[in-house]
Amino acid sequence: MDRDKILLTPGPLTTTLRTKLAMLKDWGSWDADFNAVTARVRRSLLDIIHGSDSHVVVPLQGSGTFSVEAAVASLVPRDGHVLVLDNGAYCKRAAKLTTLMGREATSLEFDEAQPVDPLALETYLQKDTSITHVLMVHCETGAGVRNPLQAVADVCARFHVGLIVDAMSSFAALEIDARSTRFDALIAASGKCLEGVPGMGFVFIRKEVLAACEGRSQSLAMDLYDQYVYMEKTGQWRFTPPTHVVVALAEAIAQFEEEGGQPARLARYTHNYETLVAGMRALGFKPFLDPAVQAPIIVTFHAPDIAGYDFKTFYAAVRARGFLLYPGKLTQIETFRVGCIGAIDSHAIKQAVHAIAMALQDLTLSN
Ligand SMILES: *Cc1c(COP(=O)(O)O)cnc(C)c1O
């Protein structure tokens, strides 16, 4: 079939035709027209979190992880100590990259089926005064848990430690308001809930901590302070920008604004999520998480109870019907994940559930 497969994944995501069409043009990286697009994108990103008074935004080439790594390297002093609030795979990745950047990292571990606990953070910070920064993941895409950003930010503010937030899979869908939530850095990317194409990340940095970031990064390409200073001075990116990604993001942001911004996006994803879970439950699938801690971003389901089940065969049977699932990322039990995000609505989700029902039939019949 000609139709692109629908991506039920945590990124890359299904994008609109309008976003894809924005890429059919070449741009000079030094050209005023392209600089204007970059400037417009940066203004819009700050508006989404009401952050233009308190924060700057620094775009960076690469996938989302590049920007998490850059944020740690640019924000945390070389002798700093990062406490990672760990309730899943993306937290573990953040802890690993912090260690690789040469910064001391300690993990405070939580159950992957539960949000991180601000009270446990408070208790920890009382006894370990060497912590300079806390690193948290807003929506833990591993299982799909929504973590309590505001409560963690409040604890960090009270203890005067910096907060670095990986908001990759929540930004533009869950509410984030820089006027009421205090963070030093918050990271997201083009190819997630903004529904652009993948290829650039961006980091919001609190203006008060920006000057201290000079010279902290041990990497040239990932130095957010340098990128910021150069961009402010010239309007250009330091090194070759992902031009097509940037113009596609500008077009995706225009559609995000037309749709009604973050509240409208959250409403659409929530409807997708509810449609998905209702349909899957009717097929006998059980979500892994308690609905009370679930973000409407990506849902982990227990693998179906079919003798000889394996994800690859299941994936292929669903794929043949036009939908791409995502493997599970839990350590102990067999699961798979279904994303609710991207330029899709509940009709696409209903079709996906139907495809899954037919795939199940295939698997059961071939037994
Ligand atoms: C997608 C995602 C990332 C970035 O992953 P990349 O593959 O580098 O784009 C980081 N953190 C979370 C929570 C994510 O969902």
Image (cartoon, rainbow, N blue to C red):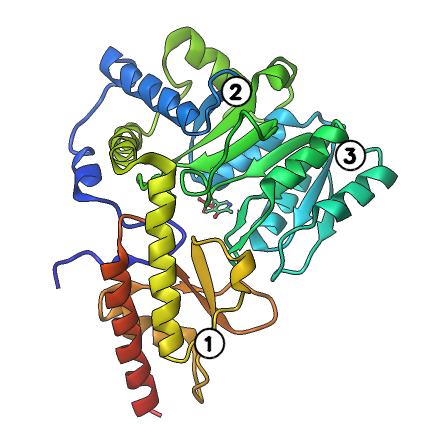
Q: Which secondary structure lies at badge 1?
A: loop
Mark 3 = which residue? 131
> Left or right of 141: which side holds 218?
right
Name the N-terminal-most of marks 2 and 3. 2
Q: Please tell me which residue lies in front, 59 or 61.
A: 59
Residue 27 location (% of width, % of height):
22, 22
Q: Is residue 104 above or below residue 315?
A: above
Quadrant location, the C terminus = bottom left
The residues tagged by marks 1 and 2 sit, at their Cα atoms, a distance apart of 43 Å
The crowding category of the residue bearing disc 2, from other C-alpha atoms within 10 Å (few below 14, some 14 to 19, many at least 20), is many
Q: Distance between the residues labelled 2 and 3?
A: 23 Å
Task: For marks 1 and 2, give the one nearer the viewer.
Answer: 2
| Element marked by disc 2 | strand
220 vs 365, left or right, is: right
> Which residue is depicted at the point 72% across and 27% down?
78
Image point 39% across, 19% down: which residue? 237
Does residue 332 lie above or below 149 as drawn? below
Q: Mark 1 points at which residue?
A: 303
Q: What residue type is labelled 1?
A: Ala
Q: Mark 2 points at which residue?
A: 55
Residue 225, given in percent of the width and then of the height, sits at 55, 18
Percent coordinates x, y for residue 324 in the rendering: 31, 62
**Residue that sits furthest to the right in the current view:** 127
Taking the view exactly as shown, the residue that stands out farthest to the left is 2
Dot 1, crowdedness within 10 Å: few (<14), some or many (≥20)? many
Query: Alpha-carbon distance for marks 3 and 1?
Result: 40 Å
Q: Which of 172 and 201 is in front in this view?
A: 172
Residue type at mark 3?
Ile
Q: Can residue 66 be seen in this view?
A: yes
